[in-house]
Amino acid sequence: MTAEFAIFLGLAAVAITAAVAMLVSRNAVYSALFLVIVFLTIAVLFLLLSAAFIAMVQVAVYAGAIMVLFLFVIMLLGSENVESEPGHRWQFATALVLSYALIIQFIIVALVMPSETADQFAEIAEGFGSPASVGTLLFNEYLIPFEVTSLLLLAAMVGAIVLARWERTT
Amino acid sequence: MTHILMLSGVLFTLGTLGVLIRRNAIVMFMSVELMLNAANLAFVGFARSREALDGQVFVFFVIAVAAAEVAVGLALIVSIYRNRSSIDVDMVSDLKG
């Protein structure tokens, strides 16, 4: 067992534990904080997979901006504990059965995946996943999708303002 | 690679489970974010094993789209809360026959 695999196992344990804790905690603020832990462990996994730039984007955008937005809305609405009674038993049971089916499918797919380099990662070129190399690819081959992304963000911003503003009914 | 796909699958399944069993709209939304992140993890894993950077560029786009989606989704939740003072999804059942 290499050191990298040991680190991976530790990170995976932390991520899965935090995800489960997010699902079961009754208070939405705790859920949000556990989700931050998941995002940070995934960022470290990105580093392990030599994706340095994406790891930084993950921390800045997900753990930073998106989670702040979530916490802001939770506290704005004061909706930490809005959960109604558990309700339908059969719904919960169905969800569990379906999740088991899904996870078994995932594991089967992961196991039968044709893998020339199944578990052994080849040596990677210097600078793979660095901001410079990702930027070169992004601004050459993916320039048009990149520009379209800016339009999408503008549309999302306008949409969010329109949806969330106060209606003056006078 | 196999174990990264497995972790990605487990996290995705936990996100699905969260959408299915929780009633709080914000927690359901956070579960969707978890699913997106699991998919990103698979993308980066494949980028590493194929030694192609395209996967990482795709993750960049997924993160940008997720940011837009969160902005609009949370605005929708705020709007729903204004109209019925609750974000319990069981309360939003006007279309139920």
Image (tube, coloured by chain):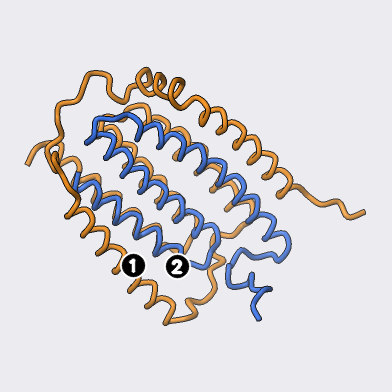
Where A168 sits versus A153, above or below?
below
Residue located 35% across and 71% down the image: A98
In the rendering, at what x and y percent does residue A163 appear? 71, 49
In the image, taking residue B57 as reference, residue A67 lies left or right, namely right
- Observer-nearest residue: A69 or A80? A69
Q: Which mark is residue B20?
A: 2
To which chain does the residue with label 1 belong?
A: A
Numbered tag placed on residue A46 in the rendering: none
Mark 2 to mark 1 CA distance (whole Å):
9 Å
Label 2: few (<14), some or many (≥20) within 10 Å?
some
Q: Quadrant of the C terminus of chain A?
A: bottom right
The colour of chain B is blue
Quick one: SS at disc 2? helix
From the image, state the color of chain A.
Answer: orange
Question: Who's the residue at 45% across and 67% down the image?
Answer: B20
Q: Residues within 10 Å of mark 1 (few under 14, many from 20)?
A: many
Q: Label 1 belongs to which residue?
A: A99
